[in-house]
Amino acid sequence: MRVVALVSGGKDSCYNMLQCVAAGHDIVALANLQPENKDELDSYMYQTVGHQGVQLYAEAMDLPLFRQSTHGVAVQQGQVYTPTAEDEVEDLYQLLRTVKEEVDIDAVAVGAIMSDYQRIRVENVCNRLGLVPLAYLWRRNQEELLQEMIDCEISAIVIKVAALGLNPTKHLGITLADLQPHIIQMKEKYGLNVCGEGGEFETFTLDCPLFNKTIIIDEWETVIHSNDAIAPVGYLNFKNFHLVQKDSVDLELSMRDRLLGIPVKTWRDLISDLDEDVTEKKLIGRGEGDEDSIDEGSSIAEDKPEVAAAAVASEAEATPDPTSANVSPSNPDAPALRNSIPCGDPLQVQWETSPLPDAPTAASNDSGWTWFGGIVGQGDDAVLAMKEALQKLFKLVEEQALEMSDLVSVSLYVRNMAQYSEMNGEYIKVLAHANPPVRACVEAPLPAEAPVLLEALAFRPRPPSAPGADGAAPGPAKFTMHVQSVSHWAPANIGPYSQAVRVGDIMYVAGQIPLVPGTMQLVSGGARKQCRLALRHVGRIVRAVDANTQLRDVVQGICYVTHPSYIPEARREWEKRTNNAIVDYVVVPHLPRGALLEWHIWAHQHNNRFEYEETGCCIGDFRVSIRRRWNYENNVSAVVCYVSSVGTGSLLTGLESGDGQTQSSNETTPALTPQPPEEMSDEHLSEVICYTLAKLLRKADAATVCNIRFFYKVGVAPNPERINSVLAHAEGFNIVHSIIPVCQLHNAHTFLSICGVRHK
């Protein structure tokens, strides 16, 4: 992509330019906001100290520089930014609009590392101008990042200090490399941010591999802004400077060629650091496998900047699964097979032919949570079906006296993932507001006349005067993380969904597939590598939302896979990292981008204090096995119930054995085609449902709202109309449910899986 780089003169914006070039992008212009009639502004958004030297940046790189004055006034300081007159963000908008009018650009490079405030506002401006934000330093480990900058020959001096442990009389004008040991010491002693992300210090870059010339500061003055005895504040004001031509630079070389031999870390480096020998104990102790990545043998099918640009510029247009042969004569619209499956026999998809009950329901609890389920989009046209499903959701939301902006999570099941892009167009029309809900989207073997199934969750704090509120204070606020910048942290969510939404102690995370963040392309190398990368995304997201929440705080999750042979690997990778969650494994025909698996989880900050139990019983000729988690207060509970035929043998056989070991392929293959169980009667199905709800509601009021997902194996389990009919006669319960057809469940013998949750 053609990139304009936002530059302040500091090390971060400079190193982000190197990252952009290493990623294959072209820096075609520079942009800077300068203070008006001041040396330095107390701005929330911009570094302005050292602005006198920014003009030399353009000359040193032989690039056009666009500048605009700013007063540095932050009119709107909340989590969400909307265009506001006189706000300093509008100065950035005017600047980038001018650049776009005069130069052909696709993206904006921004050196943000940890500032959500800055990132959110840059993303807002980029969205309004149709530009892609590139923030390759986002949430990188600061000690590693500082060392990388030094190793990559970023020659920068400290030009402002404002922190305990730094003194203007000692440290101004010192090079970053010389000051690094002291910075590390101050981090250990006072908690200093190593890259100065807390405003502790600011820098000015004199030279880097992209410069044709070196900047020489001939004269400066030291300005003491605050002579505080503990943390004095001071900065340098440049008076005279000049440029010197670099003898070592071949002006005929492109910027990318100049980086040859420079150890700039790329996406390959940042997904190659997983140690295969790391023990399960260490992974569990680390809590989330947050630094896990993929083996060095990993590769991306396409490694071209234009491919990444196409991926970012539009919302993840679906492609056929490159390692799956999930085709069925009954689905003429199924994507064509591109490659052979490396995991044994192709998955044979049996598509549902029975009608899917269209029974939209909603129920709220007195804490402000509202569940929506059973929303079906009907008709032959998938796009119109999506529109219909969203209209039904909108109506339910209105009936509950809510707004679409109150939605926390949406789960979307579609019949044909190849039509995802068109269906997503309808979704955007309804849910394109700031901080949208998280979302998971999978293909399911839905009947032809019902190509869309939707469920959702919303939250709005009950006012103290509301029925059931008992005069209590309003509930917790909703916090949303919606990172739209391309980075090396986790996949950018360019579309109308966020990475995570937290309400109080509860966090919902969007479905995570194994996209390499820096390229927005799938990592290749099989289910193990894809699983590790997707789990790394989950761990990083929950930790970014709340530093006290980690992967081990996941209460319940669903791992969607496109072939049953991926389940043992996914289960093993999960259990290396945490044993605290109850996870269901569900086989579906396709996932977005042709991913082999997708993780969809929700977490609780205090999950490590939850109780856990496994129970089971036999109902008729069927085995029922339940895993349950609940907290001490008993206001949060989750269950996963498996139903299998007693005649097919133990529940923990086949693909998922009790010791977590995988059978060999010649042992597993026969288990993929077990004898079908006897048909379950309505009476037995009712007993299963009541038994599951009794566990979920144990020691809770029977009127408590429960959200239930029924995943059923097509052609083996009771059809959806029967399940819905039995549920309709389950008196005394307050249930919101969805009935979802799938190809297979956690092993070949299970034909029904019930995932339930209740929480306040």
Image: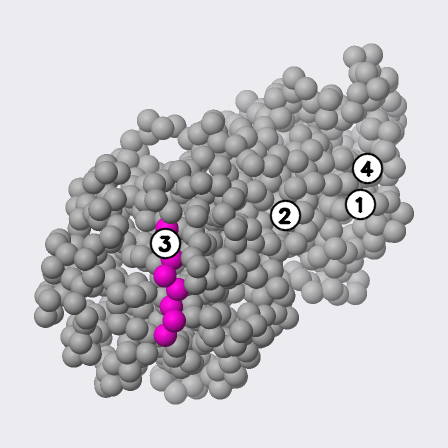
Foreground: disc 1 or disc 3: 3
- Would you call the spot at circle 1 few (<14 residues within 10 Å), some (14-19), or many (20 or more)? many
**Circles 2 and 3: CB distance less than 8 Å?**
no
Q: Which residue is mark 2?
A: 311
Residue 682 visible in image: yes
Residue located at (23% from left, 43% from top)? 668
Q: Which mark is residue 105?
A: 1
> On screen, 88 above or below 34?
below
**Circles 4 and 1: CB distance less than 8 Å?**
yes
Q: Position of residue 23 (x, y in %)?
A: 66, 34
Q: Which mark is residue 704?
A: none
Give the alpha-carbon distance from disc 4 to disc 1, as whole Å. Answer: 8 Å
**Circles 4 and 3: CB distance less than 8 Å?**
no
- Of helix, strand and loop, which one carries label 2? helix
Foreground: disc 2 or disc 3: 3
Give the alpha-carbon distance from disc 1 to disc 3, as whole Å. Answer: 46 Å
Residue located at (20% from left, 40% from top)? 667
Please say whether residue 204 is one of the residues in the magenta stretch.
no
Give the amino acid at mark 4.
Val
Give the alpha-carbon distance from disc 2 to disc 3, as whole Å. Answer: 30 Å
Left or right: residue 125 versus residue 363 is right
Q: Which residue is mark 3?
A: 348
> On screen, 58 above or below 452?
above
Q: Residue furthest front?
A: 329
Give the alpha-carbon distance from disc 4 to disc 3, as whole Å. Answer: 51 Å
The earlier-in-sequence mark between 2 and 3 is 2
The picture quadrant where one finds residue 20 is: top right
Q: Between residues 22 and 742, which one lies in front from this camera angle?
A: 742
The picture quadrant where one finds residue 151 is: top right
Q: Which residue is mark 4?
A: 28
- Of helix, strand and loop, which one carries label 4? strand
Label the magenta part by its dominant secondary structure: loop
